[in-house]
Image: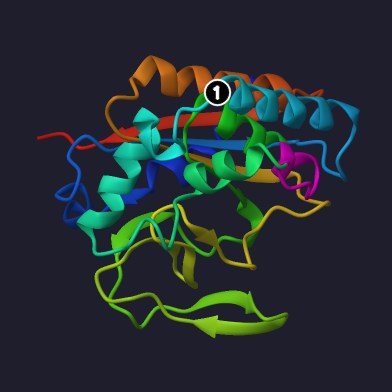
Amino acid sequence: MEPDAGLEPVLESAYLDPAVVALRPDYRVLLMAVDGLGPGPGDDASEALLRAAEDAVRARGEVPVEDLPHVAAWRDAYRAFGAKPQRTRHSLEALTRRADAGLPRVNRLTDVYNAVSVLHQVPLGGEDLTAYVGPPRLVRATGDEAFDTVTDGEEVVEHPEPGEVVWRDDAGVTCRRWNWRQCRRTRLRDETTTALFIFDALDPMTDPELEAAADDLLGHLEAPGLRVARRLVRHRP
């Protein structure tokens, strides 16, 4: 595994809108760009990791999902920008709730990052970096931004609510409601070899725990000649 100076500009140009930070000053994001990935459909290794994540959720017993510390913190963050967490669940809660019945099987890269998200209890997104137009930015939406998605099996373009927290690039919204739903354009595909992984954290998650989640993901993505760049972004008063 090698550091890649070519990926550094992508991370250095990433931007957090102060209007988002004002909602949750404890917010941090670890951005990790990876090139040289081994793409493809799910395999024995990704299946084993998904099963480990499912077993970890079952082992928690009767603790309600909404009472898990990082799940609860993100529910509060959603309320801060006007979203109803019981109706639009953040990605960590949605995956954790699905784990008992079985996590989704999509492709190798997506399956691995979903499993790591559940195991480390951190919202985690994966994006095809070659589909980005300009740098990733976390902002409060105006409501005019384009978000390409699928509704009832049809490809459609939607728009976020004004004030909604979204990740975006120059072409439009890449993820709505902070970490709720990705757009079609930047999703990881079977042929993706260059990706951006986004680890979202609030208190009580610590920086070492966030870094450990990234280390774990990298360990499961290991491939010959893998190139990596990382950046932890936070508010500096």
Residue 227 at x, y percent in the picture:
66, 29
Query: What colour-coding does the image apply?
Result: rainbow
Answer whether residue 149 is visible to the viewer in this image. yes
Residue 225 at x, y percent in the picture:
77, 25
Mark 1 Cα-neighbour bin, 10 Å: few <14, some 14–19, many ≥20: few
Say whether residue 17 is left or right of residue 48: left
Residue 75 at x, y percent in the picture:
33, 47
Residue at the outermost left position = 237
Residue 165, quarter of the rendered image: bottom left
Q: Residue at x 56, y 43 (%)?
A: 97
Badge 1 element: loop
Say whether residue 120 is left or right of residue 42: left
The magenta region covers 102-111
Answer whether residue 1 is visible to the viewer in this image. no
Main SS of residues in magenta = loop
Q: Residue at x 58, y 25 (%)?
A: 119
Q: Residue at x 20, y 44 (%)?
A: 24
63 is within the stretch colored magenta: no
- Image height check: is 216 above or below 113? above
* Quarter of the N terminus within the rendering: top right
Residue indicated by mark 1: 61
* Quarter of the C terminus within the rendering: top left
Indicate the amino acid at tag 1. Gly
- Image height check: is 224 above or below 92? above
Q: How many marks?
A: 1
Q: Residue at x 44, y 51 (%)?
A: 90
